Image (tube, helix red, strand yellow):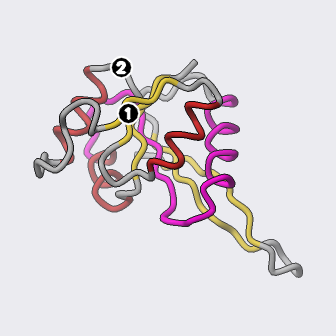
Amino acid sequence: MVRLYSDENFPLEIVRQLRQMKYDVLTSYEAGQANQGIPDDEVLAFATQEKRVLVTLNRDDFIALHRTGISHTGIIISKDDRDYLGQTQILHSCLSENPDFINRLIRIKKNNQPKSGIQIFIYQEYKR
């Protein structure tokens, strides 16, 4: 099973739900990395050193880092949305369907369904 590292901005409720599904999630708080102003490249390096996929809400900075070509164990960017159960479910689908995240960036998004107006979570891979 994929091991995860959540940065300090990632919702702890999603961490809790992922753990209930038996995912190994290390938070930045547990790792002693929170509230220290650690640069994003160092956050990603820590996740990579620990062989964990980084989960974050920080879209712009981590997309930019990914596009530099830096080697990493994977980045999943979640959406700042209070539908934590919906996000946990799409994360579970993403993690189940993709066993290898090396040098990959996945973004969780919410899309409108045509003609219904209903929004659902999807995930999309970003190329370098």
Q: Is residue 41 magenta?
A: no
Q: Position of residue 122 (x, y in %)?
A: 68, 55
For residue 110, the mark is none
Give the residues drawn in magenta, as a range. 68-97
Compared with residue 56, is residue 29 higher up or lower down, i.e. above or below? Answer: above
Residue drawn at x 46%, y 36% is 104
SS at circle 2: loop
27, 42: nearer the viewer:
27
Q: Amino acid at mark 2?
A: Lys
Kindly identify which residue carries mark 2: 51
Q: Is residue 23 left or right of residue 51?
A: right
Q: Amino acid at mark 1?
A: Tyr
SS at circle 1: strand
Q: Is residue 92 magenta?
A: yes
Residue drawn at x 35%, y 36% is 27
* Disc 2 packing (10 Å; few <14; some 14–19; many ≥20): some
Q: Position of residue 80 (x, y in %)?
A: 48, 65
Query: Is label 2 in contact with label 1 (beta carbons under 8 Å)?
Result: no
Kindly identify which residue carries mark 1: 5
Quadrant of residue 29 within the rendered picture: top left
